[in-house]
Amino acid sequence: MINSSHFGIKPVSGALGAEIDGVDLGKPISAVVFDDLHQALMDYKVIFFRDQDLTPEQHIAFSRRFGEPMEDMFVKESEDYPELMELLKEADDTGYNFGGSWHSDSTYRTSPPMGVSLYARELPPFGGDTIWCNMEMVFENLSAGMQSMLEPLYAEHLAQGYREKLAVIKGDYSKSFENVGDVVRVEVNHPVVRVHPVTGRKSLFINDAYTHRFANMTAEESQPLIEYLCNFAIRPYFTCRFSWQPGSLAIWDNRNTMHYAISDYHGHRRLMHRYTMKGDKPMGMVSYPECNMSSDNISGNNNGNL
């Protein structure tokens, strides 16, 4: 683990996560300091900053150091700042909770996001925490026999019909969605065991939100093992939990973590700004020719808007 002379590092759990102290993200950051921040992200998988007074421009500028912005396929960007997604839940929203399931972001994409930078602008007086889990540690704690069985496997990741579903639920951020009535299906195959492109470490790369079945198997055959692995992954031993404060910023590695947004602040407003970083195509222990796609596999009536 890195021990930087440029800032303080305080781990938040034994599994992953660390608070960074002594860095003002609104000011220019030297290449040397940024290299240490990047290494902290590689070591801890999610890093947190407190008391940051950032304009949207400053949030974008700092996040861009980690990666170019990536558009979401279902949620439109901010009109004023196209690099940012506005996640707003009003006090009277009681339905759908955006991010309210264990997932890695957009794994239905051919090249899912490398990471995410999330900044708290308005927060409820309580609740709204986010939990992450370390999918490298999850894989390491599986039996040798299970690891060997999973390493050559690929799985289908699927997003389907979200626009239609979200149109009829209050609290669904429908104000952020375009053409809500569209029925869209996006699917791709990814390795079940992903090799990190920077560290070379192996992690379990499935999630309950998007992983539909193992390649060349039926959903019925696949589901018991997917369910077991997803439940195994969210054991408290593998997790950390972050309580947001106004001005808090979190950056996480989407390639080897899952996260869950807790909706326990009903009757209160919450506003977050999210910057999503472009990623690369997941690489596994073996190649799988059928998933060598040049773009996302999309079907349905999308009216050319994706």
Image (cartoon, helix red, strand yellow):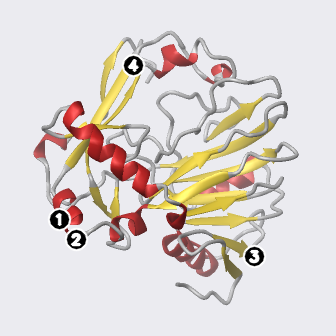
Q: Are marks 3 and 2 in contact (CB under 8 Å)?
A: no
Q: Secondary structure at mark 3?
A: strand
Residue for badge 2: 144
Q: Secondary structure at mark 1?
A: helix
The mark found on residue 50 in the picture is: none
> Which of the two marks, 1 or 4, is nearer to us in this view?
1
Query: Can residue 64 be spotted in the picture?
Result: no
Residue for badge 4: 184
- The front one of 164 and 116 is 164
Q: Residue 12: x and y, percent?
A: 66, 71
Q: Residue 242: x and y, percent?
A: 69, 59
Say whether disc 4 or disc 3 marks the residue closer to the N-terminus.
3
Say whether disc 1 or disc 3 marks the residue closer to the N-terminus.
3
Q: Are marks 4 and 3 in contact (CB under 8 Å)?
A: no
Q: Hey, what amino acid is under mark 2?
A: Ala
Say whether disc 1 or disc 4 marks the residue closer to the N-terminus.
1
Q: Quadrant of the C terminus?
A: top left
Circle 1 packing at 10 Å, graded few (<14), some (14-19), many (20+), is: few
Circle 3 packing at 10 Å, graded few (<14), some (14-19), many (20+), is: some
Q: Is residue 30 above or below residue 149?
A: below
| Quarter occupied by residue 178 | top right
Say whether disc 4 or disc 2 marks the residue closer to the N-terminus.
2
Residue for badge 1: 148
